[in-house]
Amino acid sequence: MLVYSEKEIRGFVLSLPLVHPFRTSFGEERERKFILVMAKKGEKKGWGEVVAGEAPLYSEETLASAKYMLENYLFPLALSCELDPICFEKEARSFRGNPMAKAGISLALWDLRGKREGKPLWKIYGGSRREIPSGVSVGIQPSLDGLLGRIEGFVKEGYLRVKVKIKLGWDCEVVKKVREAFPYLPLGADANSAYRKENMERLLCFEEADLLFLEQPLYPDDLYYHSKLQRLTKTPLALDESIRSVRLMETGYYMGSFSIVNIKVGRMGGIGEVLKAAEFASQKGIPLFCGGMLESGIGRAHNLHIASLEPFVLPADLSQTSRYYTQDITRPFTFSRPGYIEIPEGDGIGVEPEAGVFEKRIIEKF
Ligand code: OSB
Ligand code: MG
């Protein structure tokens, strides 16, 4: 007979093929490999997702570094905290960096808490929105016509905002053409740190496209040159990579480095840090949007609950499942009305991996 201990925590490495390759200034992804964390207490299971990629391109973290951190440091810590998310987040601060590995556990423990208390996470977080305005992030395409065609499809589906990935040579002209084809579309451009201080002037070309935002044009650890750029341009800057904590968000705010912040729980290291960031944004009137890392249904459900918080006023990088995966490991997310995704109503995140599909996608357990 198999005897389960009262509390347990496990990792699963999964692989899901993307519907469409996703190209950014740092590389291309065709399939997504990621870690799911499962935390169990009694009969209830909570799920979290670690968004680190295979290679250290978006940030330093990788699938392998995250797995190492989980097995050697963070799983034991979560167990010593009796799987309590507040205790875990506090104790995890004694380990430097590794925010995505930490966030994977934080998410699983918050979901577990919601399921044990019989409440959806958005209520526990104090969210104020029941459906989330949806945007779509469009990768660098082989041709301009291809890009325009894809955007047209997304606009017809009802997406409320489009963000195009840009890099040197796929920027001013491309954004200009997109704006000509879609004069009233709320439009953003995300450079994923493709530019350096020597090409700051070039970024002024986006002013005539009247962008909703230009995301993370400069270095991934920078606030100073972004503050110089924000003084130089009337295009609102949105920071992603640079904002790794509430403290850095405060610093960026006081330096004038951004107008908007893209919040990703993986980059911030967990829910506790996101709740504090939302609090600061509320106080200062900073508009936020919830970012994405091409998550599976588990990570996406978590993001929907996060985006319920009051300062998340801009459309999120949270698209319908069909835009990412043919068959996700949870039930698919679709618009409840054009441009909006409803937050799942069940306890915790309100979804779970569906046995058959989930098992098929597992490539490693630990
Ligand atoms: O910079 O926002 C980003 C995906 C992978 C890595 C970085 C980014 C992204 C996205 C995807 O833009 C947004 C989504 O999940 O829909
Ligand atoms: Mg980004």
Image (cartoon, rainbow, N blue to C red):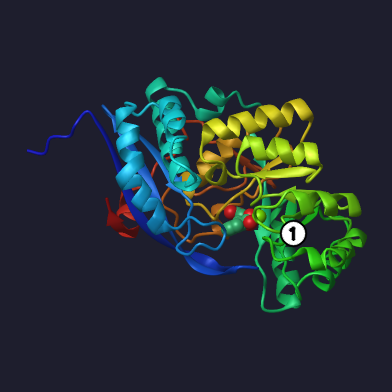
Expressed as whole percent of the image width and height from the top left, the position of residue 66 reads: 40, 51
Residue identifier under label 1: 217
Q: Camera-side residue: 132 or 299?
A: 299
As drawn, is 263 to the left or to the right of 296? right
As drawn, is 22 to the left or to the right of 327? right
Expressed as whole percent of the image width and height from the top left, the position of residue 11 reads: 32, 47
The N terminus: image quadrant:
top left
Q: Amino acid at mark 1?
A: Pro
As drawn, is 95 to the left or to the right of 143? left
Expressed as whole percent of the image width and height from the top left, the position of residue 14 reads: 37, 57
Q: Camera-side residue: 185 or 217?
A: 217
Expressed as whole percent of the image width and height from the top left, the position of residue 37 reads: 37, 44
| Mark 1 residue's CB less than 8 Å from ligand 2 | no
The residue under the point 47% across, 47% down is 98
Q: Can see residue 90?
A: yes
Splitting the image into four quadrants, where does ligand 2 fall? bottom right
